Image (cartoon, rainbow, N blue to C red):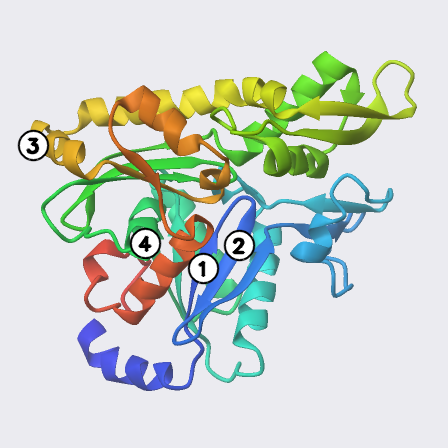
């Protein structure tokens, strides 16, 4: 049946805006076939606390909703529908996907698009099916899933189809995806629920214990971006941080420096390094020999943390580098799969072959 319908699907593809989606815990990126990445927005939705409905405001999804985190009035709450890389709130996730799909498609909505979506490598069959169904209800004609590490590796041009092994480390918002790849498949892999979000929480806890200062999610992320690091900097930095005094309850400012933030981030960085080591210990000896030569590549938002490659290399003892444009690696990979659905069909999952 799949082969009979292929010509018709090809014809529909001539008129649809097919797209690849990096559906992340922190951010969602969308790439459109033939146009590249067209959307990069936070995976946040503003909803009415009483009714559970998404606000009608044009700023209710994405960047506009993100600015509401920690600032919403009583009747509004800012929701992140994904947790640890998987959908935690299906209804809100569906509405968010519908918004992103329509925004990426623009005025061309006559034919529903085919969509390739990345998912964490360790998610269950039930979770994968939930992503497919949510995307279909959000307006997709056909949904294919690809594992995030494989999409990231393809996105940065690693030779994943070869028998020679390569190691990809994707540090996202909710999870760190680690995979040793060969012949376009994961030889051994792991999905760790320690990534950018936990780093933000670690910074918040540190400010509370060391400076008696309560800060929100956006502030902790700003600290991580501006003065965070995983390895000593050539010139250490400092930053004024505004928050609420945990003792007096009044607004206050404190000055923090990159040395203390690096020390605070040491725990999550070490957890990631330990998980990578455990993956490597399970790799076949011949693949391990390949990795001595080719090393490891880090992508995802966490790759932007200065010195993360050096910190991982010091723990593993193999060369580690940051991939090109690491934040968009997975999204670019979904775009490659989208352009070559027939070639990569074995690496893609879907509910049924339409």
Residue sitting at x 67%, y 38%: 222
Q: How far apart are marks 4 and 3 (CA)?
A: 24 Å
How many residues crowd mark 4 within 10 Å: few (<14), some (14–19), many (20+)? Answer: some
* Percent position of residue 179, x then y: 27, 37
Horizontal side of 205 relative to 133 (left or right) equals right
Q: Distance between the residues labelled 2 and 3?
A: 36 Å
Report if the CB atoms under discs 2 and 1 are less than 8 Å apart. yes
Q: Closer to the observer: label 4 or label 2?
A: 4
Residue sitting at x 23%, y 55%: 347
Horizontal side of 110 relative to 159 (left or right) equals right
Q: 83 or 273: which is nearer to us?
A: 273
Report if the CB atoms under discs 4 and 3 are less than 8 Å apart. no
* Percent position of residue 198, x then y: 55, 28
What residue did someone put label 2 on? 28
Q: Distance between the residues labelled 4 and 2?
A: 18 Å
Asked if residue 284 is positioned above or below residue 94 in the image, the reply reads above
SS class of the residue under badge 4? loop
Asked whether residue 267 is in view, the answer is yes
What residue did someone put label 4 on? 156
Q: Closer to the observer: label 4 or label 3?
A: 4
Quarter holding the N terminus is bottom left
Asked whether residue 349 is in view, the answer is no
Residue sitting at x 50%, y 48%: 24
């Amino acid at each position: 049946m799949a082969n009979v319908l292929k010509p018709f699907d090809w014809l529909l593809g001539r008129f649809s805006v097919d797209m690849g989606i990096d559906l992340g815990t922190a951010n969602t990126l969308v790439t459109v076939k033939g146009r590249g990445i067209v959307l990069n927005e936070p995976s946040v939705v503003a909803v009415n606390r009483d009714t559970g409905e998404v606000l009608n405001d044009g700023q209710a999804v994405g960047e506009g909703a993100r600015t509401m985190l920690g600032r919403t009035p009583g009747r509004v709450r800012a929701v992140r529908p994904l947790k640890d890389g998987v959908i935690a709130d299906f209804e809100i996730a569906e509405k968010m996907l519908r918004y992103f799909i329509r925004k990426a498609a623009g005025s061309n909505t006559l034919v529903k698009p085919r969509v390739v979506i990345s998912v964490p490598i360790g998610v269950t069959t039930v979770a994968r099916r939930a992503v497919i169904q949510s995307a279909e209800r959000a307006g997709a004609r056909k949904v294919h899933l690809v594992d995030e590490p494989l999409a990231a590796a393809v996105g940065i041009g690693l030779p994943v189809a070869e028998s020679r092994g390569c190691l990809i480390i994707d540090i996202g918002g909710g999870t760190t995806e680690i995979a040793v790849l060969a012949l376009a498949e994961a030889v051994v892999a792991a999905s760790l629920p320690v990534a950018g979000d936990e780093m933000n929480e670690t910074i918040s806890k540190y400010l509370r214990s060391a400076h008696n200062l309560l800060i929100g999610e956006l502030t902790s992320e700003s600290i991580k971006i501006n003065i965070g690091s995983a390895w000593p900097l050539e010139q250490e930095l400092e930053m004024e941080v505004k928050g609420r005094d945990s003792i007096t309850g009044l607004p206050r400012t404190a000055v923090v420096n990159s040395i203390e933030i690096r020390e605070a981030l040491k725990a999550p960085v070490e957890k990631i390094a330990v998980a990578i080591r455990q993956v490597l210990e399970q790799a076949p000896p011949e693949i391990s020999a390949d990795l001595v030569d080719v090393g490891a590549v880090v992508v995802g938002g966490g790759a932007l943390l200065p010195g993360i490659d050096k910190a991982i290399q010091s723990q593993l003892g193999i060369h580690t580098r940051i991939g090109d444009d690491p934040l968009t690696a997975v999204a670019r990979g979904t775009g490659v799969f989208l352009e070559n659905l027939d070639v990569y069909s074995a690496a893609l999952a879907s509910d049924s072959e339409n």
